[in-house]
Image: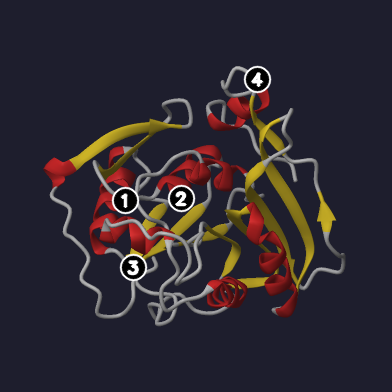
Amino acid sequence: MKSRPGTALPVIPLADTTRDRILGGRVTILQPAEGFRAAIDPVLLAAAVPARSGEVILDVGSGSGAASLALAARRGGVSVTGLESQGPLVTLAQESARENGLDGCVRFLQGDLLCPPSELTSGDFDHVMANPPYMAAGQGNPPPDASKRAATVEGDAALTDWLGFLMSRVRDGGTITIIHRFDRVDEVAAGFKDFGARDLVIFPLWQKQENGEAKRVIVHARKGGLGELRMAGGLVLHDDAGAYTQAAEAVLRGGEALLL
């Protein structure tokens, strides 16, 4: 979802993909064998969206479709649209939707948030979720793989562009949920407030209980809410032995919701 206009991204032959199971085996996703591959972030993101049957959700930067498919599998009766700029990933996501029997409620569109498809009109969605690029342009060491770099490093669309687009597509009273790097949480929260989001919840994803370190954070907000920022207790991902905690397993494999 993060390519610059005119950037040629690799075509991914079907032979160079893998079939991987998420959500305790309930969902199968096709994804590139190399380059950017979904891990636990999209499953955690989907678990944080308070969607109900009959509601419509937009997944911005949907990649190979992991978050969209996980949400649809967890919440029956929802309708999810994924927006992704990399055509090969859109193709894989659509095939995954068919393979999981979810193509009737999940669809994927190719497009860029700076020039979105005309059918994604403003204020259409009850909930919007996103896994934006974690790295600001010009910082760090960008991955050499073009597809992975497009997914993890901001291009023409900076973080403020992402937040503004998310806010523009959700209805009044709807929610916006993103997962991002914990060290950019202040930037995310400030951006949301600038665009008029309220009822902000900061939900850290702690690596372990002992060291108190969080690399990722979920930020949840409501368009036109009345409240201010609230820091939640978050979720501890790993125990001292490095295995997932029972609470993390319940979300990642058991399909339980993250209560923010």
Name the residue at 25% across, 63% down.
Answer: 87
Percent x, y for residue 68?
46, 50
In the rendered image, which quarter is residue 26 located in?
A: top left
In-image side of 173 versus 46 (left or right): right
> Which structural element holds mark 1?
helix
Q: Residue at x 68, y 73 (%)?
A: 191
Q: Who comes first in sequence, dot 4 or dot 2? A: 2
Q: Which residue is mark 1?
A: 93
Which image quadrant is residue 246 in?
top right
- For disc 2, the neighbor class at 10 Å (few under 14, some 14 to 19, many from 20) is many
Task: Give amino acid for label 4.
Answer: Asp
Tell me the distance, in whole angstroms, between the alpha carbons under discs 1 and 3: 12 Å
> Mark 3 is on which residue type?
Ser
Question: In the rendered structure, which disc, 1 or 3, sits on the residue that comes first in sequence?
Answer: 3
Residue type at mark 2: give it: Ser
Q: Which residue is mark 4?
A: 240
Q: Is residue 234 above or below residue 80?
A: above
Q: Looking at the image, is mark 4 or mark 1 earlier in the sequence?
A: 1
